[in-house]
Amino acid sequence: GSTVIYGGAGNKILAAALGEVSCSIQHKVGGPWDLCAPEAILKAMGGKMTDLFGEEIQIYRDDAPTRCNERGYLASAPGSEEIFHEALAANMVALDAVQKYKEEIEA
């Protein structure tokens, strides 16, 4: 694999939607405006997106928890299979640094 650097959450998610990258990972976003349109395009093209921990993006909800923008996102490309996304999220959550980060933002 290789690492590709893109500016902006939207560009990163669209890169996954277009298959330019297998996945895009970002640990926090500014707000729902960073995710709304790119997520819709990604999902319409067959990709998948969750927060870093493999859970549904909560930032759009009226009752969104505080600091939910710090839950970031994990976007996987169309055709990458559901199991790829789930395995990637599970492996991320298993990392000590990610567990510590989750504890910090949920405190």
Image (tube, rainbow, N blue to C red):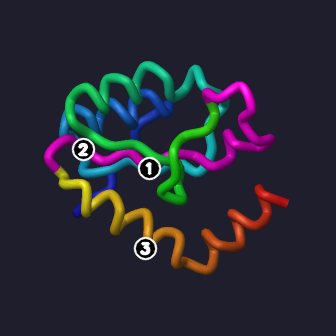
Residue at 78% in and 58% down: 106
Q: Name the residue under label 2.
A: 77
Residue at 72% in and 35% down: 64
What segment is highlighted magenta in the picture?
Answer: 60-79
Inspect the image, locate mark 2, and give the three-letter code of the amino acid beneath it. Ala
Inspect the image, locate mark 1, and give the three-letter code of the amino acid beneath it. Leu
Q: Which mark is residue 102?
A: none
Total marks placed: 3
Q: Where is residue 99 in the image (x, y as percent from the top left)?
A: 65, 72
Q: Name the residue under label 3.
A: 91
Q: How crowded is mark 1: few (under 14 residues within 10 Å), some or many (20 or more)?
A: many
> Disc 1 and disc 3: Cα gap in Å?
12 Å
Q: Residue 74 carries which label?
A: 1
> Disc 1 and disc 2: Cα gap in Å?
10 Å
- For this view, does 35 lie left or right of residue 105? left
Residue at 25% in and 62% down: 83
Chief secondary structure of the magenta span? loop
SS of the residue at dot 3? helix
Q: Which of 33 and 53 is in front in this view?
A: 53
